[in-house]
Image (spheres, grey):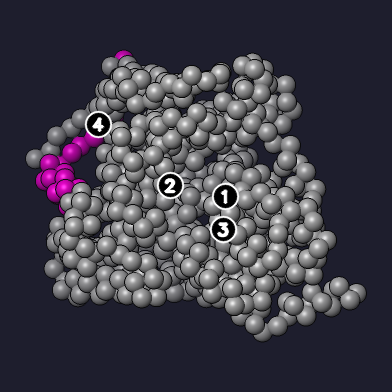
């Protein structure tokens, strides 16, 4: 199944929304010190937020009154991408818990599995690479892996 | 005469040449593997250098420094993942050239340009160090701000189809660079009470995420559509750098080496800015039919010559004034001091034989870089024969390991993944990724210099227009954008 979205419109709405959230976050995330600086720590972030907002709004207007390009999303492929993104997030969180020697081979193997790879040699090469990297960092470079 | 004999005695020993070449090999390897860096290699080899003669040790460590810079370009060209931030501009034309079936030509051009840039800069270091240091010292906050603005104007040329999207991406990069403690007031910004964020977001994990992880998500979701390894495999007999091509590129290479040397001599500026400014300049002077961003040879030669040109130049303020221009230079400063050489104005008088041996050695090492690079490239180009699925799996393992070892922190692995995911969605929506890196590199310099300059001028923005160097760079920024728009319009017509 495929869906089509307007690139500028989607990008514009997202960035304009992001700029609005950023504008609200600035006073909450940057406290002001009572110093004599001509520009405080909030000044440049505000300029950036305004620039992103104006950019987002321009993209929306460009999409409504001017030209826009369509992006075609293949939901099957996107599902694979989302699955892989989930795996990457899981890896980052499990690395300190389960350790390098368990999580990294699983990451390599899952990457091949999600890609639909059937050649067993590739799985062996990936596992061997993890082993080699572990040995290089732990024994040669004396860098402790989790 | 006696002075020269002493220098030659120091330099022309088997040991010196051996350690110099070990440094070059280690530098190329560490630079070419995403996640590893020249600084890591120097740090690892530093303890071993204590047992060596100062000239041997320091030549080995400085050789790592500029060989790693070249190594970073290898992964930029072959797998669209810059090994260092200096190599980001290289991928703009280097990767498309490799995709077109010319990986050998791209790598050899990168090597030749890097060597010429390195030798040019090393000769400047040898003969013009004190003079260049005086000019570099004239750069105050307004000049830094203007040079950062000039660097940011490059966004206009790397934004692809939509300049608005490029500007938004540049702003996002600047925003990311603001995370952490504010350098001037010391207040935390966008840290969400997470102490890992107080030190800011590190450049390398972000860079690897945006380029490598993004590409891997695309590769896994649709192996047929993403990286055109098949196209790279179609490398033909014509995939070699012709002498006539190199001859026509020499003016660009030398000009870029000059740009790299000047920018590199300014403390804190570095190879990232130098390579983008050189790319910018080459694009500004583009002739009819030269298609930058699609594998143009000048677009590859310019940043490569400039980034290696800037590496030796980084040593100018380091050796003459004791000011380290970047993190690697700071590590090298430590190495020099541990070997009894205290950088500063008196170094060239007190330790003249040792320091001139090192400086001449750097010129020789740049020549060796060319020959070692030739040997390395013969094997490294075979990466294009690796099947895509295997390459993706191996790279994700290497990149994840590299991101962890970079700062010995799991948090950097999280940063890597987050930036990979952000890069994926931005690319889906046709946002260019390179401006994010520009914002990330130049944003902090621009903000800090702007605030410092306004303190100097007591709030008057006229300080940027009344100082000649600052005004020149601001005018150049405007001129560049106007000329770019004009030439784009002309090409469209």
Q: Which mark is residue A70?
A: 4
* Residue at the spot 43% in from the left edge and 29% down from the top edge: B187
Between discs 2 and 3, the one toward the N terminus: 2
Asked if both marks, 1 and 2, belong to the same chain, the answer given is yes
Q: Which mark is residue A54?
A: none
Q: Disc 3 marks which residue?
A: B331
Give yes or no for contact between labels 2 and 3 (Cβ–Cβ under 8 Å): no
Which of label 2 and label 3 is nearer to you? 3
Q: Quadrant of residue B144?
A: top right
Instruction: Give neighbour class at mark 4: few <14, some 14-19, many 20+ (Cα, 10 Å).
Output: few
Give yes or no for contact between labels 1 and 4 (Cβ–Cβ under 8 Å): no
Helix, strand or loop status at disc 1: loop
Is residue A26 highlighted in magenta? no
Asked if both marks, 2 and 4, belong to the same chain, the answer given is no
Q: How many marks?
A: 4
Q: Disc 2 marks which residue?
A: B203
Q: Percent position (x, y) of residue A71?
A: 24, 35
Q: Percent position (x, y) of residue B319?
A: 71, 56
Which chain does tag 4 point to?
A
Q: Disc 1 marks which residue?
A: B326
């Amino acid at each position: 199944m495929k869906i089509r979205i307007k690139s500028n419109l989607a990008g514009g709405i997202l960035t304009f929304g992001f700029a609005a959230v950023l504008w609200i976050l600035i006073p909450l995330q940057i406290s002001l010190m009572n110093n004599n600086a001509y520009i405080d720590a909030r000044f440049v972030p505000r300029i950036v937020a305004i620039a992103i907002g104006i950019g987002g709004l321009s993209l929306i207007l460009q999409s409504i009154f001017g030209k826009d390009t369509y992006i075609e999303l293949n939901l099957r492929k996107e599902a694979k991408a989302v699955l892989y993104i989930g795996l990457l997030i899981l890896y980052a969180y499990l690395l300190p818990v389960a350790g390098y020697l368990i999580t990294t081979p699983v990451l390599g193997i899952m990457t091949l599995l999600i890609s639909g790879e059937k050649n067993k040699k590739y799985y062996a090469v990936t596992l061997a690479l993890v082993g080699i990297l572990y040995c290089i960092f732990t024994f040669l470079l004396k860098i402790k892996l989790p | 005469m006696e002075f020269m004999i002493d220098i030659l005695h120091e330099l022309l020993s088997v040991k010196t040449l051996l350690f110099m070449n070990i440094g070059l090999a280690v530098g190329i390897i560490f630079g070419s593997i995403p996640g590893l860096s020249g600084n890591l290699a120097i740090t690892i080899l530093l303890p071993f250098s204590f047992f060596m003669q100062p000239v041997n040790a320091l030549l080995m460590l400085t050789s790592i420094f500029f060989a790693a810079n070249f190594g970073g370009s290898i992964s930029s060209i072959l797998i669209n993942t810059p090994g260092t931030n200096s190599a980001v501009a290289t991928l703009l034309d280097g990767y498309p050239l490799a995709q077109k079936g010319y990986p050998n030509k791209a790598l050899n051009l990168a090597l030749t340009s890097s060597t010429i840039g390195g030798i040019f800069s090393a000769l400047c270091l040898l003969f013009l160090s004190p003079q260049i240091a005086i000019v570099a010292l004239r750069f105050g906050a307004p000049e830094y701000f203007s040079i950062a603005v000039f660097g940011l104007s490059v966004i206009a040329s790397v934004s692809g189809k939509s300049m608005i999207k490029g500007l938004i991406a540049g702003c996002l990069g600047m925003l990311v660079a603001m995370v952490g403690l504010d350098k001037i007031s010391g207040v935390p910004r966008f840290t969400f009470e997470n102490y890992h964020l107080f030190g800011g977001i590190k450049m390398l994990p972000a860079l690897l995420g945006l380029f490598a992880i993004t590409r891997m998500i695309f590769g896994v979701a649709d192996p047929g559509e993403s990286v055109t390894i098949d196209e790279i495999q179609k490398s033909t007999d014509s995939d070699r750098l012709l002498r006539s091509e190199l001859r026509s590129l020499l003016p660009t290479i030398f000009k870029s080496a000059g740009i790299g040397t000047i920018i590199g001599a300014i403390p804190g500026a570095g190879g990232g800015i130098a390579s983008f400014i050189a790319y910018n300049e080459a694009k500004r002077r583009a002739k009819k039919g030269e298609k930058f961003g699609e594998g143009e040879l000048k677009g590859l030669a310019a940043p490569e010559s400039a980034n290696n040109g800037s590496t030796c130049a980084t040593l100018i303020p380091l050796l003459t004034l004791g000011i380290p221009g970047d993190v690697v230079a700071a590590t090298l400063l430590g190495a020099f001091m541990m070997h009894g050489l205290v950088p500063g104005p008196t170094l060239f008088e007190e330790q003249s034989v040792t320091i001139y041996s090192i400086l001449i050695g750097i010129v020789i090492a740049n020549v060796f870089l060319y020959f070692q690079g030739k040997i390395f490239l013969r094997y490294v180009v075979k990466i294009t024969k690796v099947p895509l699925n295997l390459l993706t799996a191996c790279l994700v393992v290497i990149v994840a390991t590299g991101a962890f070892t970079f700062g010995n922190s799991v948090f950097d692995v999280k940063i890597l993944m987050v930036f990979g995911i952000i890069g994926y969605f931005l690319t889906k929506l046709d946002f260019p990724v390179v401006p994010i890196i520009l914002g990330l590199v130049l944003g902090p310099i621009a903000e800090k210099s702007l605030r410092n300059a306004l303190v100097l001028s007591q709030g008057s923005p006229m300080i940027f227009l009344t100082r000649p160097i600052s005004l020149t760079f601001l005018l150049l920024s405007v001129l560049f954008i106007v000329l770019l728009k004009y030439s784009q319009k002309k090409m469209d017509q």
